[in-house]
Image: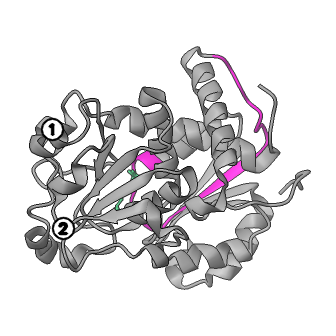
């Protein structure tokens, strides 16, 4: 690890950053994306190493962090539970002490938020949440950036969340609180959100609806996620029954604003949480959303490692 000129910051939850920092990160992501599209080399992280720790499966998070770090001039080490001592009960605190002496930044995808918090508390370098049971902040950063690219600021607008009160829902709640928009939420009973547990200070930013169609009414963005998140596979059959009416369809999209967008963090299950005609239809921006993971995370790693830079 090379000591940086600034204090260590972690990105463990969406609320770890202020609105003004997101504005900066989105500006940087725009510049970094443009350079990438123009094949312009931009390598501010030469000699820096990212360790990625995956305790759950991934396609987008793995590719976006790994490709992004190489593009910035750095290198990457990938660890999984199966091929490291993490799977053989080495304490997370010891893993943090060791890994953070050898690399400059760490991204972790794991189960309980408490695990990543424990890692960060014993890390000498910045730690990024690449998904926990409770939160998925990199994804929501990409989603907000994607909305801004297509429609401008989300401030004062309405986002409809249809489905599970899961890690994505919790992170949308924090984003609504920090960025000043309203989140309409509809979940089946037994799968509700809890704004206090999700870490939301202003309950005004969330409105709960029994019926998913009502939640979509007037929304500027409609979004959903799988019915069964990683780690909850044993509940799959019960969830399939409970969530049957929480499938985003054309009727819901028609209840939203006429220029509403559809997003899904992916992977998606057509015919379950979303109909094919919605996710593959003209209002869907899911492929931009997936690509933008890489651009916002490049901006995030640049910010955590070297602080603010001029354009
Ligand atoms: N959206 C997302 O995080 O995808 P992966 O699980 O493929 O990383
Ligand atoms: N809620 C999902 C998101 C996957 C990217 C999960 O945790 O499995």
Which residue, given by chain and number where applicable, does mark 2 sit on? 210
Left or right: where 100 falls relative to 143: right
The image position of residue 64, as x and y in percent, is: 50, 42
Q: Secondary structure at mark 2?
A: loop
Q: The N terminus is located in which quarter?
A: bottom right
Q: Residue at x 43, y 36 (%)?
A: 147
Magenta stretch in the rendered image: 40-61
Mark 1: few/some/many CA within 10 Å (<14, 14-19, 20+): some
Which residue, given by chain and number where applicable, does mark 1 sit on? 254
Q: Quadrant of residue 96?
A: bottom right
Q: Closest to the observer: 49 or 243?
A: 243
The image position of residue 138, as x and y in percent, is: 52, 52
Q: Is residue 42 magenta?
A: yes
Q: Is residue 42 above or below residue 247?
A: above
Q: Residue at x 23, y 67 (%)?
A: 187
The image position of residue 60, as x and y in percent, is: 42, 46
């Amino acid at each position: 690890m090379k000591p940086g000129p600034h204090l260590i910051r972690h990105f463990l939850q969406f609320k770890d950053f202020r609105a003004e920092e997101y504005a900066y990160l989105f500006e940087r992501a725009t510049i970094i994306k443009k350079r990438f599209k123009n094949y312009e080399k931009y390598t501010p992280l030469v000699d820096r190493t990212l360790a990625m720790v995956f305790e759950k499966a991934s396609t987008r998070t793995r590719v976006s962090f790994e490709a992004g770090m190489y593009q910035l001039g750095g290198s990457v080490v990938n660890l999984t539970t199966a091929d490291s001592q993490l799977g053989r009960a080495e304490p997370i605190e010891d893993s943090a002490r060791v890994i953070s002496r050898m690399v400059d930044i760490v991204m972790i995808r794991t189960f309980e938020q408490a695990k990543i918090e424990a890692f960060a508390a014993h890390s000498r370098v910045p730690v990024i949440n690449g998904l926990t049971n409770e939160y998925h902040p990199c994804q929501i950063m990409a989603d907000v950036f994607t909305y801004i690219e297509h429609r401008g600021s989300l401030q004062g607008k309405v986002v409809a969340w249809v489905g599970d009160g899961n890690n994505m829902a919790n992170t949308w709640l924090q984003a609504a609180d920090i960025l000043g928009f309203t989140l309409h939420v509809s979940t089946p009973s037994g799968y509700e959100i809890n704004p206090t547990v999700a870490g939301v200070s202003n309950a005004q930013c969330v409105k709960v609806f029994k019926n998913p169609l009502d939640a979509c009414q007037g929304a500027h963005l409609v979004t959903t996620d799988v019915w069964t998140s990683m780690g909850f596979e044993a509940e799959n059959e019960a969830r399939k029954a409970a969530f049957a009416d929480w499938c985003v369809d054309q009727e819901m999209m028609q209840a939203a604003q006429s220029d509403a967008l559809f997003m899904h963090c992916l992977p998606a299950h057509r015919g379950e949480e979303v109909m094919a005609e919605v996710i593959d239809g003209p209002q869907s921006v899911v492929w931009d959303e997936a690509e933008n993971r890489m651009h916002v995370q490049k901006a995030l790693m640049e910010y955590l490692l070297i602080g603010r830079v001029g354009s």
